[in-house]
Image (cartoon, helix red, strand yellow):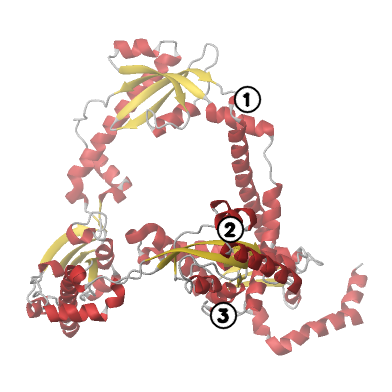
Amino acid sequence: MLQKLRDKTTGWIATLILGLLIVPFAFVGVNEYMGGGSANDVATVEAPPSWWQSAPAWWPLSMLWQRKEVTLEEFRAEFEQVRAQERQRMGESFDPREFESKENKLKVLQQLIDRKVLALASERAGIVIGNAAVAKAIAAEPAFQVDGKFNAERYQLLLSSQVPALTPLKFEEQQREQLKMLVIPQGISESDFVTAAELDRLLKLLGETRDITMAVLPPAQADAAPVSDADIKAWYDSHGNDFRQPESVALEYVEINAANLPAAAAPDEAALRKRYEDEKARFVAPEERLAAHILIAAPADADAATLKAAEEKAAALAKQARDGADFAALARANSEDPGSKDAGGELPWVARDGSMVKPFEDALFSMQVGQISEPVKTDYGYHVLKLNEIRGGGGRSFEDVRDELASEQAATEAERAYNELAGRVVNETLKNPTALEPAAKAVGLPVQQLGPFPRNAPTGIALNPAVLRAAFSDTLVQDGTVSDPIELAPNHSVVIRVTQHTPERAQPLEQVRDAVIAAVRADRQQKATEAAADAVVARVQKGEKLQDIASSEKLQSGELPGLQRGMPMPSPEANEAIFAAQPPAEGKPSVGKVELGNGTYAVFVVDKVNHADPKEVPAEQRTMLQQQLTQLGGVSATQAYVDAMRKRFKVEVLEERL
């Protein structure tokens, strides 16, 4: 056998294969294959060829492997998209510095790797997406539709507005790759199912209720026993994080508030009149028209005979209307616009704002009240219009808008004064960026002090998330420079400077000795309460009734019949513990304990488990739950498939390039 292997690796076939493998190296270079590919990659996914699953990964046979890369550009684009989503979700509480964590970057990268795994798996499975499927997917995209139909002009406009601009061919190829990648996950998801038995079991669990008896044990007596030095040292050493002093800062700041500036002088009449003339168009109400129409539908790409027939029918209806026929009746009988047909063709008020297609709008705004139009051709067919009413188009006089103009002028002057003051503050801080006092003195504003305060307990202006982020930013903390203006509200901002920074640090035992002693005693008290609860549990397990124990020990107790799973009663944790307990067995009570908080414990006995009947659940709810479970199962199965493929493929992550 060894001789046969030697013959195969030294024959003309092996020579030919090696010769062919050498060719790419002449153009690409050994380093491309040996050194992990382009320096622009942040991750790679490689798989052996489908026709040689056991192909070695070493060179030169590694050239046979299929490969997908996650480029740095792809990662940055995806990371920025996730950043925008998080900023929108969290609002002012979004912290860009915290978002830039390594954990977030790796999370986004892993999602991109999963996509590459799916893309590579799809290629290996021989999946091909035809042109018809790509065209159907693009036509179904709402962003490319007008009035529910694909619009070629809108499609071209949106592609050209991308950065960088996309050609239709490039976009179609992107969509083809996306569709190819989704075929396997969609097939897995759609193949998932939930059996009737599984659904019934879940419905029984969800609908289950329990009858319980509960007794509440108050906290034990406060511990007053001495605490030895050894106990103090042991507690301090094992709970060091509880006695750390958090990072804190102290600030000085200058507040710039338009509300505190002197009121602007009242604008003179000439200035108001000039503003009125300059902005007169703003005080003209747009003209709106109320019309009715009859649509004879004909697709834009219909043949000439179809278009001519539609036009002739529309012309005949227009003549009937001009000859005295009831327009509404003609619309109800002939119009092919489902949105207005039953209303006699009546449309809502229309302004000249592009809400209607241009030929329709142009015709409507060239008509007189009561006029019946000739057939108007649009992409939908031929329209016959009737103009019923015109409103708007008139202007408001200077006297009508004088107070409004005066208020706007005052606001403009106040904003101008604020911007001028803020600009002066910025200019002064640029002259001396590590001191705030000279700038404040130059503009006549006081320097105010705040803090020290930790990040998790801000006060004053630091309650504003933007101020808090700046106060703990590396730039202000390390350099001691004055910040840019930070907006608190419109025309209201502050500039800050960190005057004191204390890093997070462990507090010495001598400084927190009293707190450690208090913690030891609180722990003793908690353990004493828990021991009392354990004693009650033991008594119940030996046969005593919980009600009798509660009565003799003067404990607060009561019954909770029909307690539902998932209710926050007596507390979420208690509900979870109660439903985690075993059902009561003959002669053996189901008893347990749970901490309720504030040092109290509860002992409970499950008296009865009430099973739900799945047959009582309405069919609609069963169907909805089954669909939700199927979707969840499909997602889980898809992720399991991706995880399995990742184990079969070779995935390399280059964290240092993120």
- Disc 2 crowd, CA 10 A, few/some/many (<14, 14-19, 20+): few
What residue sits 64% from the left and 48% below the top?
Answer: 634
Q: Is residue 402 left or right of residue 538?
A: left
Q: Give residue 270's position: percent from left, percent from top.
A: 14, 81
Where does the image place residue 587, in percent across and percent down from the top left? Answer: 52, 11
The residue carrying pointer 1 sits among few (fewer than 14), some (14 to 19) or many (20 or more) residues within 10 Å by Cα, namely few
Mark 1, residue position: 615
User: In this view of the protein, can residue 161 be seen by the observer?
Assistant: yes
- What secondary structure is found at the residue carrying circle 3? loop
User: Helix, strand or loop at disc 2?
Assistant: loop
* Residue 524 image offset from top left, x and y in percent: 28, 32
Q: CA distance from mark 2 to mark 1?
A: 61 Å
Is disc 1 placed on a helix, strand or loop? Answer: helix
Please name the residue shown 32% across and 46% down the image: 238
What distance separates the C-alpha of mark 3 from that of mark 2? 77 Å
- Residue type at tag 3: Ala
293, 317: nearer the viewer = 317
Q: Which residue is mark 2?
A: 325
Q: Is residue 46 visible?
A: no
Tell me the kind of residue under disc 2.
Answer: Ala
Label 3 or label 2, whichever comes before in sequence order:
3
Which of discs 2 and 1 lies nearer the camera? The answer is: 2
N-term-proximal mark, 1 vs 3: 3
Pointer 3: residues within 10 angstroms few (<14), some, or many (20+)? few
| Residue shown at the point (73%, 68%) measured from the top left | 306
Which image quarter holds the N terminus? bottom right
Q: Amino acid at mark 1?
A: Lys
Mark sitting on residue 39: 3
Q: Nearer the viewer, residue 173 or 331?
A: 331
- Counting residues from the start of the chain, the first of labels 2 and 1 encountered is 2
